């Protein structure tokens, strides 16, 4: 089992790792995003400061600290976006990849396909927003290049076991 923990501040990274987190995830909720798209929806479905850094400079610091501890960092960009938001979303993806994140957590297949089409060699994880309720959906995402699928929160332990056993 792996423990995956969110972070919102650079100073949290070492404490979270020392407390037992095997992996870290976060998004970046910039002032530009807030100005352009209001403060209602963060680019990673976490409103406010929850699981969000303020800028990509902080993301660079988080990646450096986490990697010193051999801990991967996953960048969450897992909202559902309007056509007008895609330029900003893709710029965020580029900056996250440049920062050295280990994977992207996305919710929509379109973003997965665009990232793969652009030739980025980065792991893609399908977040809970991708609504995976069965092994067929997990296989669908895997066929399109997802390396991990996060199962929906509403699933029972029994359902998770069935999906896991059929997805190996």
Image (cartoon, rainbow, N blue to C red):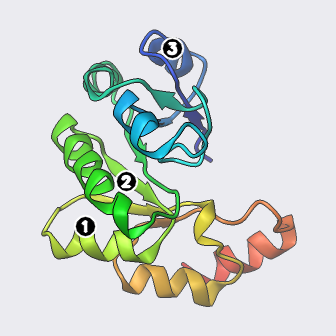
Quadrant (top left/top right/bottom left/bottom right) for the C terminus: bottom right
Question: Marks 1 and 3, how far apart in space?
Answer: 29 Å
- Residue at the spot x=44%, y=26% of the render? 53
Q: Is mark 2 on a helix, strand or loop?
A: strand
Question: Marks 2 and 3, how far apart in space?
Answer: 20 Å
- Residue at the spot x=33%, y=26% of the render? 55
Point out the tag, 2 or 3, that comes first from the N-terminus: 3
Tell which of 59 and 71 is nearer to you: 59
**x and y, in percent, of residue 119 in the image:** 12, 69
47 horizontally vs 10: left or right: right
Tell which of 48 and 104 is nearer to you: 48
Write down the residue under mark 2.
104
Say which of marks 1 and 3 sits in front: 1
* Quadrant of the image occupied by residue 64: top left
Q: Relative to residue 114, is residue 56 depicted above or below?
A: above
Q: Relative to residue 64, is residue 107 depicted above or below?
A: below
Q: Relative to residue 132, is residue 50 depicted above or below?
A: above
Marker disc for residue 12 = 3
**x and y, in percent, of residue 75 in the image:** 39, 44
Write down the residue under mark 1.
115
- Residue at the spot x=59%, y=48% of the render? 45
78 horizontally vs 40: left or right: left
Label 2 crowd (10 A; few <14 / some 14-19 / many >=20): many
Is any part of residue 165 visible from this angle?
yes
Label 1 crowd (10 A; few <14 / some 14-19 / many >=20): some
**x and y, in percent, of residue 106 in the image:** 45, 60
Q: CB of mark 2 within 8 Å of CB of mark 3?
A: no
74 horizontally vs 102: left or right: right
31 horizontally vs 41: left or right: left
């Amino acid at each position: 089992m792996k423990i995956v923990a969110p972070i919102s501040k650079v100073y949290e990274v070492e404490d979270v790792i020392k407390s037992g987190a095997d992996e870290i995830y976060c998004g970046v909720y910039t002032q530009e995003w807030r100005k352009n798209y209001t403060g209602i929806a963060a680019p990673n479905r976490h409103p406010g400061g929850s699981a969000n850094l303020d800028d990509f400079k902080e993301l660079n610091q988080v990646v450096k600290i986490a990697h010193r501890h051999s801990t991967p960092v996953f960048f969450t960009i897992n909202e559902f976006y309007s056509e007008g938001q895609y330029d900003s979303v893709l710029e965020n993806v580029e900056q996250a990849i440049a920062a050295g994140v280990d994977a992207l957590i996305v919710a929509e297949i379109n973003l997965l396909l665009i990232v793969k089409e652009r030739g980025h060699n980065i792991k893609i994880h399908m977040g809970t927003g991708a609504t995976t309720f069965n092994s067929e959906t997990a296989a669908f995402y895997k066929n399109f290049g997802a390396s991990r699928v996060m199962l929906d929160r509403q699933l029972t332990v029994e359902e998770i076991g069935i999906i896991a056993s059929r997805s190996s």
